[in-house]
Image: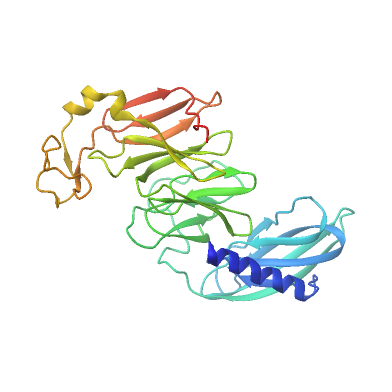
Amino acid sequence: KEYQAKAAARISARKASHHYTLNNMLVLHNPYGTNTTSLYVYFTTDENTSVRYTVSAPDTDYPDFSAKAYQSKIYQKTHEFSVLGLIPNTTNTIIITVTTHRGSSVTRTIRYAMGSLLGSEEVQVRRTSGAASSTTLGDGLYAILGNDSDGQDFMFYYDNDGILRGEIPILYYRAHRLLFRNNLMYFSVSTRDIVAMNRLGRITRWYNTSDTYLLHHDYAMDSKGNLIVLATNVTKNTIQDAIITINGRTGKVTQLVDLGDLFPAYKASAKFATMSSSSSSTTNDKSSSFDPDTSSTKKDWIHLNTIQLLDDGSAIVSSRDTLSLIPFAEPTTPAE
């Protein structure tokens, strides 16, 4: 949070210190540390204009990447946006095109020597088997959410040509789902943290599941902007059997459902699944010497994997270990 605030303050100071125009744009590489292959761009124009950009790497054989810069209006005089898709380890040429409502256009060129990626992912992925599809692809980017990891991991954007256009660092684990609300993108960055990032790459909100819960696999957002999260209560001797809510405004964490309370007989009949060696003196949860806080052998009896909120506010969750879908009435966030 402190890093993001300092980065925003530095950008504000730069903007206030000079009049940036199309002929003298403010260009910063990844100022918020949230997308390795991106640039922050800011400038003003005398007329209301729209903006497009094209990224090319002349010293490589990668195709160009073009996109429309986001603006709150189609035509405006202040332009502040992220350029995505720079190719690592080469000099990139970025063509900025501004167009008036009358259709007249002007272009300017930025050249930027992009450094290395933080990770070791492929710059271009290629089809290794199977036939190519004849279906026309949509105009967009494909998000690779990462793999389970105990260390630094990443979310990636790839374009229709399989070329890397974004490397988004996360703390560990993986980003399980992308949620969008009020021009913010929400995604998990660890087993305890979910963040909201704006279009400039700034993390503006940070939610934590608290010391009691770990996020597991999936989450959704209700109509009020609250996060509904599949979780594990680490103080218990079971895993992946709880649903919590995180208040979108305050960040307060509340348990909505403990599946063990709904299906006590089935939970009691289930056996332990050994995750790793245990530091507890016993793996029997009926024993008085069993310590769930120090045991890595916990009962994985239902294993919730996905959650989907429906239009009427109700929810459906999937259970891996029972091969079932479980419906719930509206999982309303408790009043504060």
Q: In this view of the protein, which residue sits in the foreground, 249 or 101?
A: 249
Q: In this view of the protein, which residue sits in the foreground, 26 or 240?
A: 240
Above or below for 187 versus 57: above
Q: In this view of the protein, which residue sits in the foreground, 88 or 119?
A: 119
- Residue 47 is left or right of residue 265, and the answer is right
Q: Which residue occupies 22% across, 24% down?
A: 266
Residue 233 placed where, x, y %? 31, 41
Q: Quadrant of residue 128?
A: bottom left
Above or below for 55 versus 321: below
Residue 332 visible in the shown view: yes
Residue 222 placed where, x, y %? 54, 34
Q: Which residue occupies 34% across, 52% down?
A: 148
Q: Which residue occupies 34% across, 45% down?
A: 212
- Residue 233 is left or right of residue 195, and the answer is left
Q: In this view of the protein, which residue sits in the foreground, 275 or 57?
A: 275
- Residue 84 is left or right of residue 43, and the answer is left
Residue at the outermost front position: 336
Residue 112 placed where, x, y %? 62, 75
Residue 62 visible in the shown view: no
